[in-house]
Image (tube, coloured by chain):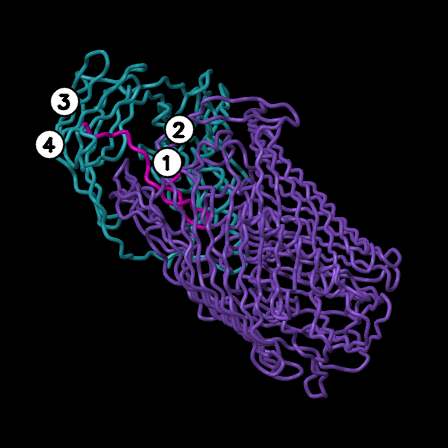
Chain colours: A cyan, B purple
Amino acid sequence: MKYRNIKLRKTMKNFTFSTYATIFLSVIAIISCTDPVKIKLKEGRSEVAVDGSITDQSKVRSTPLPDTVRLTRTNGYLSGPAPVISNALVIINDNMGNRDTLQYTSNGKYVTHVNKITGAVGRNYELTVEVDGQKFHAADLMPRVTNVDSLVTDYRTEPQYGRSSGYFINLYAKDLVGEGDFYRLKVYKNGILYNRPLDLNIAADAGFSDNKPIDGLRFIWPIREFLNPTTNVVDPATSGDMAPYIPGDTVTVEILSLSTASYYFYTQLQRQLLNDGLFASPAANVVTNITNSDPQSSVTAVGWFNASALSSKSLVIKKKD
Amino acid sequence: MQKITFIFISLLAFILSTGTQAQERYTLNGKIKDAANGEDLIGATLTIKELNNGVVSNEYGFYSITLPKGTYTVNVSYLGYATFEQSVDLNANQKLNIELSNESITLNEAVVTSEAANKNVSDAQVSVAQLDIKQIRKIPALLGEVDVVRSIQLLPGVSSVGEGSSGFNVRGGSIDQNLVLLDEAPVYNSSHLFGFFSVFNPDAVKDVKLIKGGIPAQYGGRLSSILDVRLKDGNNKKLAVNGGVGLIFSRLSIEAPIVKDKGSFIIAARRSYADVLAKPFLKGELKKSSFYFYDLTAKANYTLGKNDKIFLSGYFGRDVFGAGFGFDWGNGTASFRWNHVYNDKLFSNITAFYSKYDYKLGTKGTSTSGDGFVWRSSITNYSVKPDFTYYLNPMNTITFGAQAILYDFYPGLAVATSENVDTEISLPNKYALEAAVYLGDELKLTEDFTVQYGLRYSFFNYMGKGTAYTYGDATPGIKKPLLSEQQYSQWDIIKQYSNPEPRLSVKYGLNSASSIKASYNRTAQYIHLLSNTAASIPLDVWTPSTNNIKPQLADQYVLGYFRNFGSNNTFETSIEGYYKNLKNQVEYIDNADLILNPYLEGQLLNAKGRAYGLELYLKKNKGKLTGWVSYTLSRTERQTAGVNKGNWYPSRFDRTHNLNVVVSYDISERWSLATNFAFGSGTPISLAPNKIDYQGFSVSQNPDGSRNNYRIPAYYRFDLSATCYKKKKQGMKYDWNLVFSLYNVTGRRNAFAIYNTASDPDHTITAAGKPVQISNTPQTLKLSIFGSVIPGITYNFKF
């Protein structure tokens, strides 16, 4: 048995709720707990799963890296690694006449040839996947992205926001003026992406919600705060690399632009990955932009293909004098 | 509908004709009270022995009965009180105020045996449960703290999603379909600490009545049930203090006469102190955290002459949680009531109330950063409600009245501060007016045959100032596109609705110990709690019916058989079946975004619902051993295009079997034991069988898109409590008892939910000892709210 882990929640709702409900529960010695269970649920029909993107990363990297499309098949939730698809024909083309047939490497990954196609803001990209006689399509527009003005060390002498004291980072970056800019913010420590569901950090303009945009300002506080490691607030000592940064760490922040459709996909992904506990809403499937060219076909695909522009900045955490 | 209106008018004509037959009749009326503290007794039965005819005291202890001239034996009985009997020579209209004495609880002495009334059999009202606070106190409780809402969840037809969920579900209705009244003012969130306790301070509560079906015409505004909680008036004979010290909170109440026998007051307060006790165990920033609740309940009454009495009641409570990021919510209610007896037969009560629920969350950030996020939301309403009861003749008791409620919905104002620049994210207020008129009659056609019928006519006006949104059609289950917005200025009508709500209950007495009852009622509900989570959260937003959200409607049919056993109606039993048809239920598209969303109406779906079930109830009221067994077999389902491929699916709170056994046993003068056993079938949840491997995440995928496709394991729980009472001594004012309780004795980890999630970080460790990759191993977890047995101890005192 594992006692319920206290987590900082990404969405405002979950952020406050699960955390404090659980604190309350644990302090009155009524310990709510979670137990891993094996359940009997019949595995569903397998679908083609697409995990692909194209970026303009070559503009920020010294040596351009290829973009990747990964193809797998969905399988039982607890059935182990997803079977990979290695026999597909994968093509990306843009609206300027560029076209690239991706090269299969390993583990379901198909990579672009950097001299054939690279991302550029404002262009439309189309993905075509042919597998076992079925043809799937997806398309996305690469939107503009804002710059990281600076990244600074934020040394906290006092515990704050449910985190212990220590070294953290503070981002200076402003949303571009004009409503309808969407971003995903990523953090790497020493080259490793923080890639827990809690680390998914999605912004609509400078805020959270596209319903009431906060436009043209610096990214609001919770978004910046989530660039810091997600800490186990009950016992920071056991939280491993979720503890504060340490001097010498190289921290990199990337901002990727998202189209409106990709923004909705990511907000749904975030919601479903964090949808647990007392205040969970009904589990639902995440939207997909992969369609079968034959709408009558019984073979369906899931997943997402997006085109994102990228900006980035790195910081080496310096020891406080 | 026209047919019902015709029947209604015919019956009304019948009353008027019966009224004229009377010759030389006189009215006996008055109030029935508790002799010890002057509290009005609700639902006491007054019987005229010679005629085998009777009447039940109303919510204010008032009764009136009109009889032919003669000499009668008046018998008044009320559970837990010694029976009152007096001969009355009725040759003129007469006022008779009756005071009942507490039944002696001393078991060894000669006990004045009181006869339990057979009200459950003889009343026309079906599907009703009345719980005296004394009965509630006997049930083993979580942490030894008795609780009104947790107690009613042990009754047939009442359930909840699970431990730790706010509110309760009645006969397949959602939690917002219960009208929870505290001295006639509605309470919008009846929970403290996420549903572990309710807002009702048991020291201040006198009487609790839950109506699940055959809802009389005087009640309206919610589909599924009425929970009518009445506060004590306050002791009008002498000063009395009640209190308790427990593990989680302490209580204190003071009641005293303002002017002896004329007016009195009660003030009751509670505060939890888990935060104070926990402080030494908290680390880091959590030391600064706060989590507690408090509430204050107060009431005063004053009798103005023979025919008038006024009451002022108020409640205020808050839950506060915070550690850097603060969160608090609470209700406030105030009601003013004026009872007036116009003449021997006409009783009236006029209520004016105010009720508000609000919450706030956010942070101001650090003082230096100038950053923060604050969000507020509320619902406020004001209402006037005159109610009249006309005791026309022994055959007819007519009720009529009206209500108007003005709503002010404040869906949310969020202020995000970034570098001292405030950005307001505000959703405009919404205004609405709800009104209703009603007329009802209880007609005793013969000694055995009673008909309770009535009509409520309700109106709803969604009005400006505000913005009305028009949405286009879309594939069901997908966010609807916004077509246009229209601004309305103050008081402009945006959308109007009205609904006739016929109500009918029929009782046929087979003999003095058994009866058959049937009822039909239509109810309409114009305000909705938007909640898409398994357990309702305090952030859930109430919304009016609008041009896009139609009023919810329910038709309920009930058939029941009621039978008492034993010489003094020692055992009450009933069997009831119900069928409920629900229209315009609010459902949500997948991945609906309900928080701070001005366009949320585009994400709502209109669903149909049906609920049906069978309820068995056995209750023992008297003797050393008391308690009840309740069993419910039920089903509740929803259907809408866009969810579950348009097929019917069980709702999240569907429980096939639900069994509760509550037993208490008085061992001696000083000790009593109580036990409770609860069993419930697992509730359905949505659980995806497959996963998508996307960017290192395992994303749940259900290729069928089926809703609530899996049932969590069955729930069962066993509780025990023992109460030690102070030794009885003559003349000692101070009294105490000590309650020891064990909740969930077997320590069973009942599942609240089962869900797919990523495991805690797994690291692939390199030779250098540094993690190179964070992986998210998929796992399916069972969440249990209580992981072990929970002991409790509470010391209660009074003087």
The magenta span reads A270-293
Q: Are marks 4 and 2 on the same chain?
A: no
Residue under the image location 52 percent in, 31 percent down: B547
Label 2 lies in what chain?
B
Which quadrant of the figure contains the C terminus of chain B? bottom right
Q: In this figure, which residue is indicated by the disc labeled 2?
A: B473
Which callout, 1 or 4, points to the residue nearer the camera?
1
Within 10 angstroms of label 3, few (less than 14), some, or many (20 or more) residues?
A: some
Which callout, 4 or 2, points to the residue nearer the camera?
2
CA–CA distance between discs 4 and 2? Answer: 35 Å
In this picture, residue A281 sits left or right of residue B451: left
CA–CA distance between discs 4 and 3? Answer: 17 Å
Q: Nearer the viewer, residue B221 or B706?
A: B221
Q: Which mark is residue A133?
A: 4
Q: Is residue A234 above or below residue A219?
A: below
Q: Amino acid at mark 1?
A: Gly
In this picture, residue B628 sits left or right of residue B26: left
Label 3 lies in what chain?
A
Q: Amino acid at mark 4?
A: Gly
Q: Which mark is residue B477?
A: 1
Q: Is residue B34 magenta?
A: no
Q: How far across and down, in percent of the image, does residue B676 sit?
A: 51, 71
Whether the residues at callouts 4 and 3 have beta carbons within 8 Å, the answer is: no
Which callout, 1 or 3, points to the residue nearer the camera?
1
Q: Amino acid at mark 2?
A: Asp
Q: Which mark is residue A101?
A: 3
Q: Is residue A274 magenta?
A: yes
